[in-house]
Image: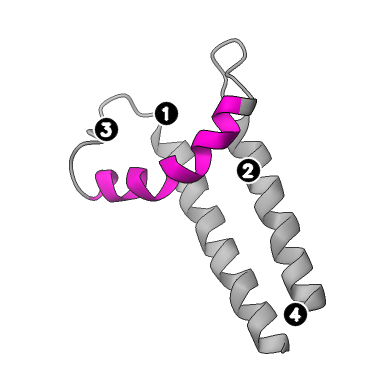
Amino acid sequence: MQQAGALVSTLIEGYTFVIILWCLLSWFPNIRWYEQPFKTLDMLVQPFMAPFRRLIPPMGGIDLSPMIAILILQFIAQQARTYL
């Protein structure tokens, strides 16, 4: 059962890395999000981020929703390591 928790935790940590990469790339205005590999990255992250963006709109041009999403993912990964 511990292996399942470790696997879930590893997958969540990998997805957290993808979100962080997506956030860092958003700082570069010349990135073409409609071309590969950025299109795939955007397609992986946008569906997960959409509910957070509806709850937490950008304040002063700063989008805080990725931080909340990452905190929730880290909490879920910690619970998976503990209880699975």
Return the residue at label 1. 27
User: Residue 32 in the image: x percent, y percent?
Assistant: 22, 33
Q: Residue furthest right?
A: 82
Q: Nearer the viewer, mark 3 or mark 4?
A: 4
Left or right of 64 in this view: 37: left
Query: Which amino acid is tagged 3?
Result: Ile
| Residue drawn 59% across the image and 20% down it | 57
Q: Amino acid at mark 2?
A: Ala
**Whole-percent x and y of residue 64?**
62, 28
Amino acid type at mark 4: Leu
Residue 48 located left or right of residue 64: left
Residues drawn in magenta: 37-54
The amino acid pointed to by label 1 is Trp
Q: Which residue is tagged 2? A: 69
Is disc 1 in contact with disc 3, using a CB cutoff of under 8 Å? no
- The residue tagged 4 is 84
In the displayed structure, 13 sits above or below 46; it is below
Residue holding disc 3:
31
What is the x, y in percent for residue 73?
65, 54
Quadrant occupied by the N terminus:
bottom right
Dominant secondary structure, magenta: helix
Mark 2 packing: few (<14 Cα in 10 Å), some, or many (20+)?
some
